[in-house]
Amino acid sequence: MLQRIVQSAAGAILLLVGAQVSAHDLMTLDDFAAAIGWDFEGTEIRTEKVGDTLYVLFGVGGNIAVSVGDDGVLIVDDQFPQMMSRIKAAIAELGGADIDFAINTHWHFDHADGNLTLGPEGTWIVSHSNARAMNMDDHVINLVSMQYGQKAYPAAALPDITFDDRMQFHFNGERIDLVHFGPAHTTGDTGVFFRGNNAVHLGDVFNGAYPFIDADNGGGHGRHNQQADVLVGVPIAGVRAPSQLDQATSIHDDDRQESRHMDRDLEEDARHIDRE
Ligand SMILES: [Zn+2]
């Protein structure tokens, strides 16, 4: 969940306490939306230009990065089916047509439920292999004061293409790196680096505060720092933030002490990216 949503969720916790909702009740999407004030019907998509071929869309759920150009349309995260007609309209205004690829930064509903629409329509969905595995079964996302029940996706909404450590797209005139650093916000986080636009989308690994870690589903504390270190090290100036990356440097500084505990192999990963 992104910064706005985390902030909203904090308010929702108070709301839920006031309403005396049992901490053990599993919330549906309607429950969750009502609790934190999401408005699927009334929320318009806001578009912000990031670079020559890259935009970010703000709606309900995780922000969407959109690459539009001669090769077609590639998006990062896809929000919700309820928002999809407006998402597509926003992409059309940018000159795009069908969504060719949708990368899920992770399996959480607010970033991937749009798969339920895009998958059956033929969009190629891409994720880390662990994210796909999580989408195959029911899971409870434990937000401490709220427990959200995320249902398994049907086969058509599951990622079609997965990777384990890293992969590259060569799309719309730039190289797009997908990198997984190990357990962080979830077990299947993907950082998406748009090399030609000096931009990165990190899903919920950075969202303006120290991120929620989905520990009940295998998320891990230590690996956020690898992403922070890599970001500081990558040879891209003026990194922009489809997903609140502007916060990355301060988070990195706050947690520099902990980053000393990085595993050796992941330090190597960071150096490898630094050299590229
Ligand atoms: Zn998430």
Image: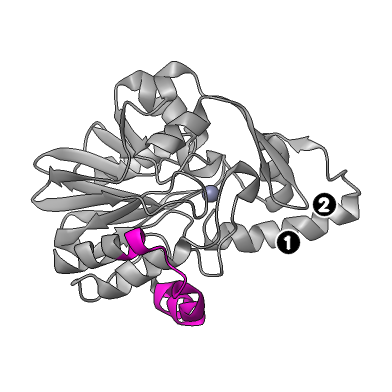
Q: Is residue 49 visible?
A: no
Of residues 23 and 3, which is closer to you in this image?
23
Q: Could you tell me the amino acid type at mark 1?
A: Gly
Q: In which quarter of the image is the C terminus?
A: bottom left
Residue 40, quarter of picture:
top right
Whether label 1 touches label 2, CB < 8 Å: no
The residue tagged with tag 2: helix, strand or loop?
helix
Give residue 169's position: percent from left, percent from top. 17, 43
Query: Is residue 112 shown left or right of residue 36?
Result: left
Residue found farthest to the front = 264
Label 2 crowd bin: few (<14), some (14–19), many (20+), radius 10 Å: some
The image's mark for residue 11 is: 1
Residue at (22% x, 48% y) in the render:
67
Q: Could you tell me the amino acid type at mark 2?
A: Leu
Task: Please give the residue where the numbered disc 2 appears in the rendered image.
Answer: 16
Mark 1 to mark 2 CA distance (whole Å): 9 Å
Is label 1's Cβ within 8 Å of ligand 1? no
Query: Is residue 236 shown left or right of residue 147?
Result: left
Of residues 82 and 219, which is closer to you in this image?
219
Residue at (70% x, 34% y) in the render:
28
The correct choice, above or below, for 205 with respect to 70 in the image is below
Task: Inspect the magenta stretch and tell me whether residue 255 lies in it.
Answer: yes
Residue at (69% x, 40% y) in the render:
148
Give residue 219's position: percent from left, percent from top. 55, 50
The color scheme shown is one colour
Query: Is residue 64 shown left or right of residue 95?
Result: right
